[in-house]
Structures are given as structure tokens and as C-alpha cells.
Image: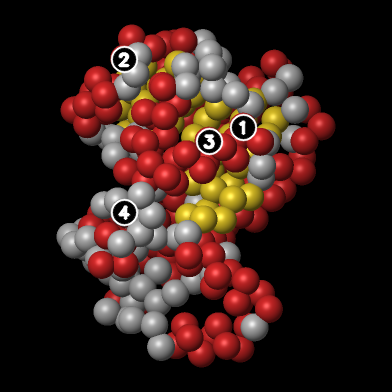
Amino acid sequence: MQLQNRVVWITGASGGIGEQLALQASQAGARLVLSARRQDELERVRAACANPGQCAVQPLDLADFDADSAREQAEAFFGPIDILVNNAGISQRSLIADTDMAVYRRLMELDFFAVVALSKAVLPGMVARGGGHVVIVSSVVGYISSPLRSGYSAAKHALHGFFDSAAAEYWDVGVRFTLACPGFVATQVSANALTGDGSSNGRVEASTAGGMDPAECAARIWKAVAAGRYELLMGRERVYVYLKRFLPGLFARLLRRAEQR
């Protein structure tokens, strides 16, 4: 699916990968609905777009929303959604022993259930129109895991299981899915990550700061969408996916030596 004149709804559009997805889609001629919690940051992104008049701002808190109402509000700007980009989410930095169950539930709500709810809200319309595209910004940890990310990894693994089924079920009706799985990307994701008591981690880690440029990540995602590609692994960390698949014992030993603080 090409972006010209398409209606594209992007969650988590106030910064990082989501912001770059919005800027590049606007440059390509898409009509955008930008969603996130912070309206001021959404307005900043809208103003930076190539055609701000074809960009709408829809504040949305995925921790407390009704998916069908949110979809109706999004479609009120430019019409039915052609491409939904599920980019919003939150990471984790805490040991299992230190993590409250409320934190695990929040991670699942934001990183799994909200994505499923929004996707289910737009899918009937896509089916009725004979096509559409749903993008899921997942992570390399949707295939593997590591210390300090047990809940985040579990939510991303759940996304993969759900959308593997969705891609098969909706193939014959023309709806396509792209599961984008980057490694480290230079964003605020580690600073915003939840600690064991639900507070923010508050620091950008060196591994994150040294990650892929979010503009490059966004460009690869849009290229995959245009090609109708389902799975997209990005970043040097993707080597660990293959290592776990073909040398699981070695991968397990490396994981035990990973930083746990």
C-alpha cells in the first residue's frame, strides 16, 4: 500500500519512531491522524509535517479509552482509516522479584490489549472496503527476552501470537499486516520505561542512545508497508533472534551474563 492520499492513523505520534513515521508519511502525501497523550507534543509534530492542513491531532490515552469511540473520532477528520500504525507502548526496567503485579497488568494493557482493541476497531471497515493495512511496532524482544524486561517481552510475544493469526485470517479479504521489530532505537523509551513500582526509569541508557536513528527505523517500516511485507527485523540486535533459533544453548548462556541492573 502506498501512502499518497491514504488516511493514516498513528498512535504514539508525539515523539521517537511515531514522530518520524508521521513526518515521512506527510512528506509522501498521506492524510494523518496523530494520537498520543500529550496534545502539545502532537501539535509540535503536526506543525513540522510537510502539509499540516492534512494532519489532525487526536489526544488519546490508551490506558483509559473506548476503541470504537476513538476510531469514530479519528475517522471524523478525513474519513475511513486506510492504515493503522500501532506504535504507542511502554517498556520496562525491573527484575521479576521487584515488579508489582499492577505493573505487569499495565504493560499488558498498553502493549497488548490496547493494540488488539484498536486493530479490531478498524478491521471491520477495512474488510468492508476490500483492503487496509495494520502496522504493529513490536520489538526484537517479541522473539527473545532479556533481564529487566519480563513483562514487556511477554506483551510483545503476545502481539506476535495474535497477529500471526490475524495475518492468516484476513489475507483473503485484502487486509495486510506489518510486524516491525527493531532492536535498540535512539528514543526516550528507556527513560519512560516502568520500574518495579510503576515509576519511570528516568534515564536514557547507553544502549538505547547508541541505537538506530528513529528516522531510519521509520523509513524501513514504510518501505515494508509499501512492499506488503509481514515481518521486519531491524538493527544489529536481530542476530540474537537467529542465535536463539539455531544455537539456543549459547543464547541462554549469553542471556545469563546480561546486565541485570
Q: Quadrant of residue 57?
A: top left
Residue at image position (54%, 85%) is 252
Q: What colouring style does the render use? A: secondary structure
Residue 261 rendering spot, x and y as whole percentages? 27, 79
Name which of mark 3 and mark 4 comes first in the sequence: 4
Sequence-first disc among 2 and 4 = 2
- 256 relative to 124 in the view: left or right: left
- Bin the neighbour count of mark 2 within 10 Å (Cα to Cα): few under 14, some 14-19, many 20 and up: some
The residue wearing badge 2 is 52
What numbered label is drawn on residue 222?
3
Q: Measured along the vertical axis of the image, is residue 253 above or below residue 86?
A: below
Q: CA distance from mark 2 to mark 4?
A: 25 Å
Q: Amino acid at mark 1?
A: Ala
Q: Give the amino acid type for the residue marked by disc 4 in the picture.
A: Ala
Q: Is residue 81 visible?
A: no
Lower position in the chain sequence, tag 2 or tag 3:
2
Observer-nearest of 76 and 51? 51
- Give the mark nearer the N terminus: 2 vs 1: 2
For the residues labelled 2 and 3, say whether their Cβ atoms are less than 8 Å apart.
Answer: no
Distance between the alpha carbons at the discs numbered 4 and 1: 24 Å
Measuring 51% from the left and 61% from the top, which residue is drawn there? 140
Question: Circle 4 is placed at which residue position?
Answer: 186
